[in-house]
């Protein structure tokens, strides 16, 4: 049986895949808890470091929990047991489980969050929607590519729903469901900031999360103006928008992260057992439609 790597070695490999230098300035990535000299035999991958995921890691006997979202993104003044941020810290430390976060650095990476989302939706010939200046090829936020076979917006939205974990929100769509789409831009997580980039890319549809009312309204109004200026009907304004639950759009990356860690450790002759958490950490629990009168 191959020996277990140390936590410091695992962190080094994770940071090689997801360089901290590519994280946004406001982000908080890297090792949160754990002894760098400790051996790592089991690694759990999850989107959110919430209590249910920490419990899953402890029950499974994980030595390391890798999450996409940071536990300590904003400043805290106490990590006392029983507090929102302190309780998971205490649970992890007393259970001997380290915590590592790869957030916006994983968003931008090759085989990162955006690329995993593009792949699960069947996009080909992809490239970054917003390349990271000074980084290597393929590094940047979002991806834009094309579908192997063009389809309607409605059918594409159904594909998105089938490819991602089911959530109470489901999939929201802004646009003509019968319109043909071929070129797709994606960004896992909150995507308001790249609406302009999606428009500039010429994508027929933009898939992301957490789209707000005013941002969507303005984007659709601009798309209508663009369509009329090009001699097309206003309803054909692009990009159309597909809005998913935040958790759902980032979840596909976990399988890539787990497989890549095992692959990278093989060069050292070491190995770990990995697991992708199936805990659905989307905070919404139900959606109620107005009853038919």
Image (cartoon, rainbow, N blue to C red):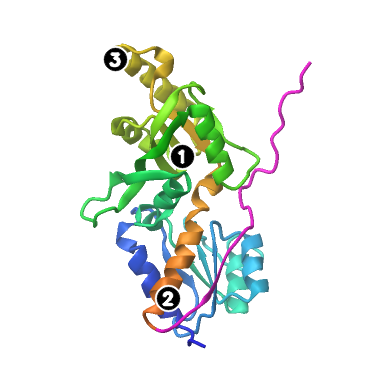
Give the main secondary structure of the magenta stretch: loop
Identify which residue, 173 or 282, lies in the foreground: 173
| Mark with earlier residue (1, 2) | 2
Asked whether the residues under the numbered discs 1 and 2 touch, taking CB atoms below 8 Å apart as contact, a structural biologist would say no
Decide if residue 100 is on the left or right side of residue 226: right
Residue 84 in the image: state x and y as whole percent: 61, 59
- Mark 2, Cα crowd under 10 Å, few <14 / some 14-19 / many 20+, is many
The residue labelled by disc 1 is: 208
Q: How would you rate the neighbour count of disc 1 (Cα within 10 Å): few for under 14, some for 14-19, many for 20 or more?
A: many
Q: Is residue 126 left or right of residue 278?
A: left
Give the residue displayed 32% in from the left and 18% down from the top: 226
**Residue at numbered disc 3:** 230
Is 215 drawn above or below residue 233 in the view shown? below
Task: Classify residue 8 by image quadrant.
Answer: bottom left
Residue located at (38% from left, 57% from top): 111
Q: Secondary structure at mark 3?
A: loop
Which residue sits furthest left?
134
Q: Which residues are magenta?
A: 269-293
- Residue 81 shows in this picture: no
Assign the C terminus to one quadrant of the image.
top right
Give whichever of discs 1 and 3 has the lower sequence position: 1
**Residue 84 seen anywhere in this rendered image of the structure:** yes
Q: Of the two numbered discs 2 and 3 on the same chain, state the one appearing first in sequence.
A: 2
Helix, strand or loop for disc 1: strand
Give the Cα distance between marks 1 and 3.
Answer: 26 Å
67 inside magenta stretch: no
Label 2, on which residue?
10
Residue 210 lies, in percent from the top left, at 50, 38
Marks 2/3: CA–CA distance: 53 Å
The percent position of residue 9, horizontal first and vertical second, equals 40, 79
Q: Position of residue 108 (x, y in %)?
A: 35, 53
């Amino acid at each position: 049986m191959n020996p277990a790597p140390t936590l410091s070695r695992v962190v080094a490999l994770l940071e090689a895949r997801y360089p901290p230098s590519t994280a946004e300035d406001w982000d908080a990535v890297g090792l949160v808890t754990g002894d760098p000299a400790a051996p790592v035999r089991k690694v759990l991958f999850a989107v959110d470091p919430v209590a249910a995921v920490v419990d899953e890691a402890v029950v499974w006997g994980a030595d390391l929990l890798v999450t996409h979202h940071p536990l300590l993104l904003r400043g805290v003044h106490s990590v006392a047991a029983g507090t929102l941020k302190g309780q998971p810290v205490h649970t992890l430390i007393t259970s001997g489980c380290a915590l590592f976060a790869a957030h916006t650095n994983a968003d931008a990476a090759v085989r990162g969050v955006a690329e995993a989302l593009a792949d699960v939706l069947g996009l080909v010939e992809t490239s970054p929607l917003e390349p990271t200046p000074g980084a290597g090829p393929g590094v940047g936020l979002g991806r834009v590519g094309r579908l192997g076979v063009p389809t309607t917006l409605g059918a594409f939205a159904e594909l998105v729903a089938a490819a991602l974990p089911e959530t109470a929100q489901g999939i929201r769509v802004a646009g003509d469901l019968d319109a043909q789409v071929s070129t797709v831009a994606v960004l896992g997580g909150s995507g308001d900031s790249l609406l302009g980039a999606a428009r500039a890319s010429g994508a027929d549809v933009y898939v992301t999360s957490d789209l707000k009312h005013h941002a969507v309204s303005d984007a659709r109004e601009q798309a209508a103006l663009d369509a009329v200026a090009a001699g097309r009907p206003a309803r054909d304004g692009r990009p159309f928008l597909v809005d998913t639950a935040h958790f759902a759009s980032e979840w596909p990356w976990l399988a890539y992260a787990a497989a890549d860690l095992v692959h990278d450790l093989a060069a050292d002759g070491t190995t770990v057992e990995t697991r992708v958490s199936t805990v659905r950490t989307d905070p919404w629990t139900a959606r109620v439609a107005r009853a038919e009168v």
